Image: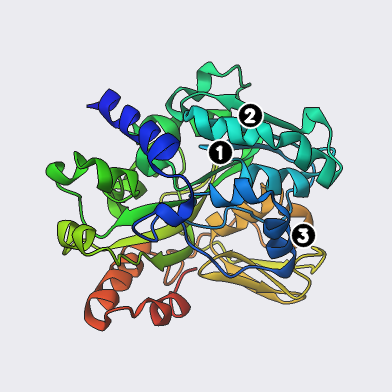
């Protein structure tokens, strides 16, 4: 079954799809609102690279200058090129993809983007290989500041291994920042075997609760949601096949921090954003439940404190408090009812996710 899926995905993205206009759903190609700077970078990418982009989210976090970055399932290279431009001459981006035709497009336009962004050959590299076998790609363990992926893990049969290997490749304090497709219930086996649904990033999607458990067992103890968007399915044939399952594009950030706890605990800590990031002068978001305005201390749970204090974000924050006194559970920090509320709201309101997004509580 695994080999059949691999061959099917290679065929779909290498031969069946000529451009992202050939997709039958919005699952593998979603336009998200973003900053003028990122829009400008996207528009500057070579047209052939952009039209063969099949991502489902925006996987460009803040403060990545000088970072060592790995792009899992880099495809035509769009995200890798943008990340390399932001990482700059002191940074390095490695893209890996198993589809020969996609790697060829990225390699074809590598020099173009190096010249466009003032980069050198050492700043950007593409590898032909499977993301399930990334440890065989001569990559050093504990060496990456950031690992990204855009709508690819759902296409991989052994998702647990991808998460486990990503954890091994990250530096302590590094993060896995990625977008993928998730379902509101487990996808039945007969749909998983449907090549069209698998290629369209639907039938390989994980039920969100199964993903959360996989992430935690792989070492990422506190998965954080950055954004959630419902998937639009206009094709009647596809819609009939998957009904009543609902699908969402969700962007997660998973930190490799040893002392994260399974739950959000209250130690009386607080953080204050300095406002010293050029792209975020007034406020900065950690995830959907955490927006930090410049110059204002906000109480946070111990896990949030560590995510900011033990990662590349440390120099952008001031920190108050210690670990001396435990005050119990931090309020409104359990992700399960949050996600369940999203799915329930969407069931009862149709496309009612925008309201849910803005009102999600967290620590």
- Can you tell which quarter of the image residue 41 is in? bottom right
- Can you tell which quarter of the image residue 274 is in? bottom right
Q: Which residue is mark 3?
A: 316
Where is residue 87 shown, x and y percent of the image? 77, 45
| Secondary structure beneath label 1 | loop
| Secondary structure beneath label 3 | helix
Q: Are marks 1 and 2 in contact (CB under 8 Å)?
A: yes
Give the mark nearest the N terminus, 1 or 2: 1
Where is residue 60 shown, x and y percent of the image? 63, 54
| 35 versus 117 height, above or below | below
| Secondary structure beneath label 2 | strand
Residue 232 is labelled as none
Residue 126 is labelled as 2
Q: Is residue 28 visible?
A: no
Number of the front mark, 1 or 3: 1
Give the mark nearest the N terminus, 1 or 3: 1
Circle 3 residues within 10 Å: few <14, some 14–19, many ≥20: some
Q: Is residue 130 visible?
A: yes
- The one nearer the camera, 113 or 358, is 113
Where is residue 32 shown, x and y percent of the image? 54, 66
**Residue drawn where x is 63% and y is 68% of the image:** 34
Where is residue 79 shown, x and y percent of the image? 62, 47
């Amino acid at each position: 079954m695994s080999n059949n899926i691999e061959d099917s995905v290679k065929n779909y993205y290498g031969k069946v799809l000529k451009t992202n206009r050939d997709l039958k759903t919005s699952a593998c190609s979603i336009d998200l609102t973003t900053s003028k700077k990122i829009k400008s970078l996207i528009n500057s990418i070579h047209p052939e690279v952009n039209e063969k982009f099949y991502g489902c989210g925006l996987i460009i976090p803040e403060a990545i200058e000088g970072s060592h970055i790995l792009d899992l399932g880099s495809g035509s290279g769009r995200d890798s090129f943008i990340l390399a431009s932001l990482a700059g001459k002191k940074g390095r981006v490695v893209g890996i993809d198993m589809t020969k035709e996609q790697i060829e497009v990225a390699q074809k336009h590598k020099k173009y983007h190096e010249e466009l962004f003032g980069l050198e050959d050492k700043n950007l590299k593409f590898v032909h290989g499977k993301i399930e076998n990334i440890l065989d790609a001569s990559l050093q363990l504990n060496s990456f500041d950031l690992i990204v992926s855009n709508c690819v893990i759902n296409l991989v049969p052994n998702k647990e291994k991808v998460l486990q290997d990503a954890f091994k490749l990250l530096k302590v304090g590094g993060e896995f920042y990625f977008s993928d497709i998730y379902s509101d219930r487990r996808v039945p086996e007969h749909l998983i075997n449907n090549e069209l649904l698998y290629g369209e990033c639907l039938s390989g999607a994980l039920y969100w609760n199964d993903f959360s458990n996989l992430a935690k067992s792989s070492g990422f103890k506190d998965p954080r949601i950055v954004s959630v968007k419902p998937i639009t399915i206009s094709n009647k044939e596809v819609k009939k096949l998957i009904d009543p399952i609902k699908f969402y594009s969700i962007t997660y950030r998973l930190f490799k921090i040893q002392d994260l706890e399974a739950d959000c605990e209250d130690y009386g800590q607080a953080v204050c954003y300095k406002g010293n990031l050029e792209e975020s002068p007034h406020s900065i978001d950690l995830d959907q439940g955490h927006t930090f305005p410049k110059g204002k201390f906000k109480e946070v749970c111990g896990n949030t404190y560590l995510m900011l204090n033990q990662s590349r974000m440390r120099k952008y924050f001031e920190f108050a408090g210690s670990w001396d006194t435990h005050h119990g559970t931090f309020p409104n920090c359990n992700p399960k009812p949050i996600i369940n509320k999203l799915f329930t709201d969407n069931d009862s309101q149709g496309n009612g996710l925008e309201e849910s997004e803005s009102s999600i509580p967290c620590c």
